[in-house]
Image: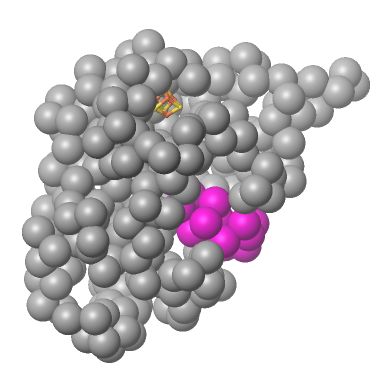
């Protein structure tokens, strides 16, 4: 079999494994899957191995501040996602925030408003934070990817490679003692790990100067049903309480 086809098959199988991890039991050939297949065919060189964090090319001048970085992102065309975006979603919050929250990528509402976590998962995220006495105005909220992937598909390896330097520069400028990784994409890129979320969540890891906590993405919690949803919400609540203890040190 040609190498490219093998690569595409590998991509499909890892996408299916990812969907399974999210609790999806069956897949129909809908628009999300066709969009993924198109993407897989276009990106021939996708690799199974995660690129080490230092290998992501950074062409951002070292002296760029947050306002300057925001302007660079607004004009960015480094990956295909610029074509269909309405707005880039840079992120928002104080420059000296003690915690940076990192999601996956903007969804529909975020793309419309140009602000992070303003749709249904944003509402749940706000409630989750408020439950541990943390308020949106005090933390910096952003995502790994700054433009909405069509049909909210999972961002591809090349898109992550293109966009990650912006997040890395944001994190270096803000230099928070705590990073909260929401879901698998943020966790895997920050921790340079291919492990499933289950094995990464609920404890602190290290990224540069920050302690990184991994929890379930609110969109994942919203997609679950019945007892599975209850179980995962319970787990998320447990993780939030560990987070609160750490955050209390910096209040
Ligand atoms: N999900 C994300 O990961 N980021 C957003 O900004 C919105 C939803
Ligand atoms: Fe640029 Fe990131 Fe948007 Fe791609 S997703 S165009 S890398 S800002």
Main SS category, magenta section: helix
Is residue 218 within the magenta segment? no
- Quadrant in which the N terminus is drawn: top right
> Which residues lie in the magenta part?
184-196
Residue 242 visible in the picture: yes
Is residue 188 within the magenta segment? yes
State which quadrant residue 195 falls in: bottom right
Compared to 163, does 120 lie above or below?
Answer: below
Q: What is the x, y in percent for residue 238? A: 31, 83
State which quadrant residue 250 falls in: bottom left
Camera-nearest residue between 93 and 59:
59
Q: What is the x, y in percent for residue 131? A: 12, 76
Q: Count numbered badges in the picture.
A: 0
- Horizontal side of 94 relative to 142 (left or right) equals left
- Which quarter is ligand 2 in? top left
Camera-nearest residue between 31 and 248:
248
Compared to 124, does 168 lie above or below?
Answer: above
- Quadrant in which the C terminus is drawn: bottom left
- Horizontal side of 183 relative to 111 (left or right) equals right
State which quadrant residue 149 falls in: top left
Q: What is the x, y in percent for residue 243? A: 31, 79
Kindly identify the residue that appears in the image at 31 percent across and 73 percent down.
236
Residue 234 visible in the picture: no
């Amino acid at each position: 079999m040609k190498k490219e086809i093998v690569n595409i098959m590998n991509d499909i199988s890892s996408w299916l494994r990812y969907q399974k991890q999210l609790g999806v039991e069956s897949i129909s050939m809908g628009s999300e899957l066709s969009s993924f297949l198109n993407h897989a065919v276009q990106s021939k060189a996708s690799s199974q191995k995660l690129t080490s964090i230092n290998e992501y090319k950074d062409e951002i001048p070292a002296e760029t501040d947050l306002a300057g970085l925001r302007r660079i992102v607004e004009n960015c065309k480094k990956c295909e996602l610029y074509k269909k975006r309405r707005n880039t979603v840079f992120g928002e919050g104080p420059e000296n925030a003690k915690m940076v929250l990192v999601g996956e990528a903007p969804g529909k509402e975020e793309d419309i408003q140009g602000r992070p976590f303003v749709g249904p998962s944003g509402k749940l995220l706000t409630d989750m934070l408020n439950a541990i006495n943390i308020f949106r105005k005090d933390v910096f909220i952003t995502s790994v990817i700054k433009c909405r992937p069509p049909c909210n598909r999972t961002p591809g390896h090349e898109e992550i490679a293109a966009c990650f330097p912006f997040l890395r520069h944001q994190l270096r400028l803000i230099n928070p003692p705590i990073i909260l990784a929401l879901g698998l994409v943020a966790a895997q890129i920050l921790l340079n790990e291919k492990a499933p979320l289950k094995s990464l969540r609920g404890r602190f890891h290290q990224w540069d100067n920050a302690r990184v906590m991994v929890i379930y993405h609110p969109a994942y919690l919203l997609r679950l049903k019945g007892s599975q949803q209850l179980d995962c919400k319970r787990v998320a609540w447990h993780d939030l309480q560990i987070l609160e203890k750490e955050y209390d040190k910096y209040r």
